[in-house]
Image: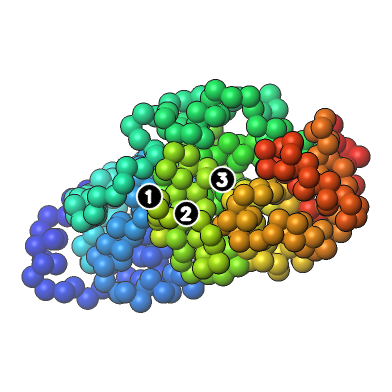
Amino acid sequence: MTPRRGARKKVGMEPIVTNIPNIETVRWAYRLVLGREAESEAVLVHWAALGDGRVILSHFVRSPEAMANRAAGAPSYGAWITAPIDASAIRAAFHMRFNATPSAAEIVAERGAHRDMPSFRRAFLASPEVRALEEEETTRLVPRPAPVVSANLEEHAVTVLGRRFTLRGDGPEGYWRDLVEKPADPSLERLTRLVRAAFPDGGAGRVLADVGANIGLTCLALAAAAPYHAELLCFEPDERSLPLLKHNLVANDVPNARVFGHALAERDGVARLRCGTTNAATSVLVEPHSRVQTTGAMFQEVPVRRLDSVLAEHGIERLDLLKLDVEGGENLVMLGAMEAIARDRPIIFTEFNLWTQMTAGARNPMEVLEEWRAAFRHMLAFDEAGRPFPVLDQDGLLWVLHTVMTQRGCVDDLILCDDLAWLERWA
């Protein structure tokens, strides 16, 4: 942005009364700082109550999401990116930087200085006011245990349904090493086959949710299997994986993906995330009932949302597929999505992990299977050849439990759904 001579000095001398609509300032704070749209109009009203543009800017720049966004290269999402530079964006930027209203000449100058919205945003993020807040936040933060994501970043190519993706990950981290060095996880092929069978039209207009997205491999698989999807919602609360997830989606050109840096459960609030110290894929949400080891563990405080709340706030009125891999928290995610499940009857592809069900979930795994089987018309497990088949009765549930325990390393996949028409198209 073009500098405004003397503006900061004037602001420092006395408050400036501005007639800038604060809601528009907050709307553009989301876009310019976080690179995305706000969750809802109610959220805009909440932040607009702060009034002072500099205070609004401070809250956004110092947020954990803003730090993760910067680490990922400041990616952006939404139609606003390709729109012309709007006068409201310039007014909001001046409100946040100087707590003042730009003149007509300054608006013309800003439009002349930047060819498009990405250019305007880059200049805003590079402005002295934003940089000063970033430096203050970096200085203020108490040093934390070294995160898994380090400077040892590597890239690895994967091919899904003939489409080549390049993933970025942390070289020494356990999940990444498994991805690079070991045979492909069968879950990825199962998921892509399910999506192709369920949505033979390429997923036109469908809404897919990846809960426990990690660095984005399954997000990319969903995008490849349903290339015409309307929305791909990617949820990952671990601040170490979140920047890599955002980078991998942007680098591999998945335009209809939205990234959410919070956990999902049956409530809205905050919780502690126990972070796997050598493998970010083993991070678990710690609830009061959980039985997880705390000695030597690293924790993050993360926001928690109900999926129903997120869908409502973003005006998303359908849910077609829900992929769950949240280390024992699958039940809680389903409870927080009961409105969408009852309304849309989505297909649910879920991990069933005996250890995490007993520890993080503090549940008897057999009881979990019985609840899932009762809640949906159909439950499907996978045979030795990797084909899904319906689990019809209690003996079938006992087979699932025994097979997962003795042959599948205590972890396997299940499908929960209300319609089996897709099974005939499985290939």
Figure check: 409 above or below 239: above
Depth check, front residue: 134 or 370: 370
Q: What residue type is labelled 2?
A: Gln
Does residue 16 appear anywhere in the picture? Answer: yes
- Which is more N-terminal, label 2 or label 3? 3
Q: Looking at the rendering, which quadrant does residue 153 occupy?
A: top left
Q: Which residue is drawn at 40% across and 53% down?
A: 295
What residue is shown with label 3? 213
Q: In whole angstroms, how far apart are the C-alphas of marks 3 and 2?
A: 23 Å
Q: Residue at x 43, y 74 (%)?
A: 45
**218 left or right of 228?**
left
Q: Which residue is drawn at 83% across and 36% down?
A: 383
Q: Which amino acid does label 3 sit on?
A: Ala
What residue is shown with label 1? 296
Give the label on residue 293, or none.
2
Depth check, front residue: 32 or 181: 181
- 3 or 1: mark nearer the eye: 1
| Secondary element at image label 2 | loop
Figure check: 290 above or below 352: below
* Residue 225 placement (x, y as % from top left): 71, 36
